[in-house]
Image (cartoon, rainbow, N blue to C red):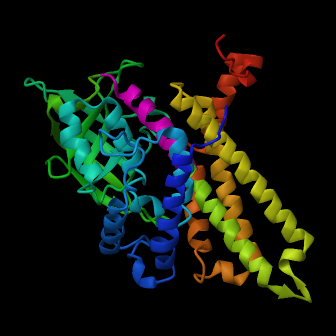
Amino acid sequence: MDFTISPALEELRARVAAFVERELIPLESDPASYDAHENITLDLLAKVRAKAKAEGLWCLQLKPETGGLGVGRVGMAVCYEAMNRSIFGPVAFNSAAPDDGNMMVLEAIGTPEQKERWLQPIVRGDVRSAFAMTEPHPGGGSDPQMIATRAEKQADSSWRIHGRKWFITGAAEAAHFILIARTSDDKRHGLTAFLFHRDQPGWKITRRIPIMGPEEHGGHCELEFDGLTVAPDDVLLGEGQGMRVTQIRLAPARLTHCMRWLGLAKRCVEIANAYAAERHGFGVRLADRESVQLMLGSTAMNIEIARLLVMKAAWELDRGGLARKEVSMAKIQAANTLHQAADIAIQINGARGYSKDTVLEWIYRYARQARLVDGADEVHRMVLNRSLSGEGADFWRWPVAAE
């Protein structure tokens, strides 16, 4: 595993970083930049997206033939970290969840017709999208086998769907949806993935669920399906392949969360370092106090551990592996590191960190969801234990090159 990056990738990373510094960081300190849900306003977003497109920094996660830059998973890890130095970063480059994961899965498994109808409008930035899988109790959450939303096949081969979903990120702004529903009770092939447009009848958003942190555009919504009809051509990958669709989508999508969280964690350290260097108390700079040095040194180490785990998982995906345990380890480490970095940065900044004079309190509230989204810490630890039980000492095996 050699994580040396190419000069071309370093040039792209530097361009992303320069765009963030020049176009996005200054917006964070202006209250007029924020909408009612504490994200960048849509009119301002349209302007920065146009600039990102003009500078060739658009959809770098996709293949060139799809409209992207084709940097691969390792390249994404490098650039996404730079993007999310700003809280407004990923969405400016069309690399934010849930569009990010939806575009990657549609690119990977969509038919040519599905890519033209459902993927390309997201790539162009004409529409937003959502992934509707999670359900209220007793439906499916981290365990897709519990999914209760039902799709019944009709005489004309279309599907009629009934059920409920909740905490569907971006739903209030989304036009294109990927919906996971049960089509049989088969344990392996009982789920199917459907594509639908917001203008289709038979479904509604019942509420936008209030949360403790700032929200993505479109919030986190509860949906009700009462006879949504989906044509057979809008089934993704085929009947009974819904579990496979979720597996193809969720591993890279989970990892991209981690890539972005690392950028925010580094920003927290940056703000804390700058304040500690200038703030004096009792005749001593904060930066010269051993307690502050220990906090910052420990956080820097944990960020680097998370970066290495993310890179290993990205490398494994790039070479065609599933990276299940690698992604789980990265997810746990990156989520907890972000939370720790925000907490320590606020502690070092004192009341200033707790105020809205910096973005630290925004990041802190946002960070708490990281240990829950795309599988709680405990779920990923169970995944790792399952791998350990099955592999034994081979859990830690080194990859061996072919002779």
Residue most toward the front? 7
65 left or right of 317 in image: left
- Residue 275 position by quadrant: bottom right
- Residue 315 position by quadrant: top right
Is residue 225 in view from this perspective?
A: no
Residue 249 belongs to magenta span: yes
Compared with residue 268, is residue 90 higher up or lower down, i.e. above or below? Answer: above
Q: Residue at x 27, y 23 (%)?
A: 238
Instruction: Choose between 74 and 235: the one closer to the eye.
Output: 74
In terms of secondary structure, what is the magenta stretch mainly? helix
265 left or right of 70 in image: right
Quadrant containing the C terminus is top right
Instruction: Choose between 190 and 84: the one closer to the eye.
Output: 84
Compared with residue 392, is residue 119 higher up or lower down, i.e. above or below? Answer: below
Report the span colored magenta.
240-258
- Residue 360 position by quadrant: bottom right
> Where's residue 11, x and y in %?
52, 54
Q: Residue at x 27, y 32 (%)?
A: 110
